[in-house]
Amino acid sequence: MLDPEQQVIQILKQEGINFTATLPCDRTKNLYPLILEAFEGIRLTREEDGLGICAGAWLGGGRPMMVIQSTGLGNMINALSTLNEASAVPIPILASYRGFYKEGIDSQIPFGRRLPEILKGCGIPCTLIEEAQSLSRLSEVIRDAYDHSRPHVALVSPKVWENSFSRAWQENPPLEIRPGERLEGELHGPVPQPRITRFEAILSLTDILEDQAVVCNLGVPSKELFQAGDRALNYYMLGSMGLASSIGLGISRFTQRKVMVLDGDGSILMNPNALITIGQVRPDNLMILGLDNGVYGSTGSQNTFTQSGMDLGALARTCGIRHTARVNDGQGLKDAVREFEALGKTSFIHVILKPGNSSCPNIPLTPPEITRRFKESLET
Ligand SMILES: Cc1ncc(C[n+]2csc(CCOP(=O)(O)OP(=O)(O)O)c2C)c(N)n1
């Protein structure tokens, strides 16, 4: 007789799951080490980031699943709706359901009590698994997500694990605090004056693009990339602000191609967690371009904090991305891209830009069309 934790592992394997994105919950602490052992995956620092990573993993040909605490769904709703639902990107989620059964932490209760209604209101399918005998319903959750290309949440009650005899979790011995790896090189040199706009930077990139997969930040940058040269290998984001680099990371885990992300300063500052994870995973085929025009360009050019000294290159370095460059014109950008592609390591190019949007029209493709053709072209 398998304990419930082992049953979960067995079900995930039977359903072909080959990648997990995880963030722990106390109630599933016996499950967590088994998941990390059984599947390739990424340990998250914020659950919303996992939706981007898993979207990329699926686009690249993987079959991912998230294993989190239900509270994390509170910071995932936007991406569940604007990425997974709108762009038809499947994701099954096992959420350890807090605030529901024998809850010892009062603050878990308000959100937990309303969660099924919240998910229902957002149109996100949800299956409540109250007892170990019902764990087989996880199979239905996974199949539903993949058959219908949509998110599906399994809310798994703490009662499921109550009589488990699993001892997979062991308290770690107290860690020694180690000094972090030291940063090398100059971080805070003077910022050069920008010489080009975002559109000019994108136009200069199209000269040197070959068969890279390109993920582009939402809003005007995606319209500009479409205008500069549409390719099936461009993934234009239409929502889920902050997840461009996360999606790029997920793709990079499942493709041999080089993956380039065109991210924005406002979007990076919304989800610096992406850089934190990338700096730990460091896939060889991932390059991030931080297109820093100092503003939220797509919404009317309101200042971001890069205007007042927040240095994106230093942020990337601090997160563990060792190869960074700063450029301020088209030639410098092309040179840096070529240099880092030849190097074949995770890299971050901080592109200092003038603010300003071109007047490009909307992209005449629906989000599911963009998803389908990108995924198909990655597979070939
Ligand atoms: C969660 C969320 N908040 C706000 C917005 C509105 N919004 C769309 S694009 C954008 C600006 C993005 O700025 P940045 O990443 O710097 O790129 P830029 O447009 O300047 O190239 C904002 C604020 C959104 N779509 N989603």
Image: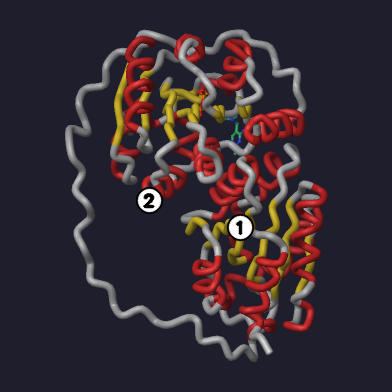
State the image coordinates of residue 282 (x, y, percent, origin top left). Answer: 39, 45
Question: Ligand 1: which quarter?
Answer: top right
Tell me the residue at 30%/13% (across/down): 193
Residue 18: mark: 1
Give the labeled residue for mark 2: 280
Task: State the residue lying farthest toward the front.
Answer: 380
Q: Quadrant of the C terminus?
A: top right
Tell me the residue at 63%/10% (across/down): 360
Tell me the residue at 63%/31% (across/down): 237
Count of number-bearing discs:
2
- In the picture, measured across the screen, residue 83 lies left or right of residue 180, that is right
State how far apart marks 2 and 1 are (Cα). 20 Å
State the image coordinates of residue 250 (x, y, percent, origin top left). Answer: 54, 44
Local packing at callout 1 (Cα closer than 10 Å; few below 14, some 14-19, many 20+) is: some
Query: Is residue 156 depicted above or below 111 in this figure?
Result: below
Local packing at callout 2 (Cα closer than 10 Å; few below 14, some 14-19, many 20+) is: few
Q: Secondary structure at mark 2?
A: helix
State the image coordinates of residue 152 (x, y, percent, origin top left). Answer: 75, 57
Q: Earlier in the sequence, mark 2 or mark 1?
A: 1
Query: Is residue 124 depicted above or below 351 in this figure?
Result: below
Q: Are the residues flagged by discs 2 and 1 in contact, CB closer than 8 Å?
A: no
Quarter of the image for residue 39 reads: bottom right
Query: Is residue 130 depicted above or below 165 in this figure?
Result: above
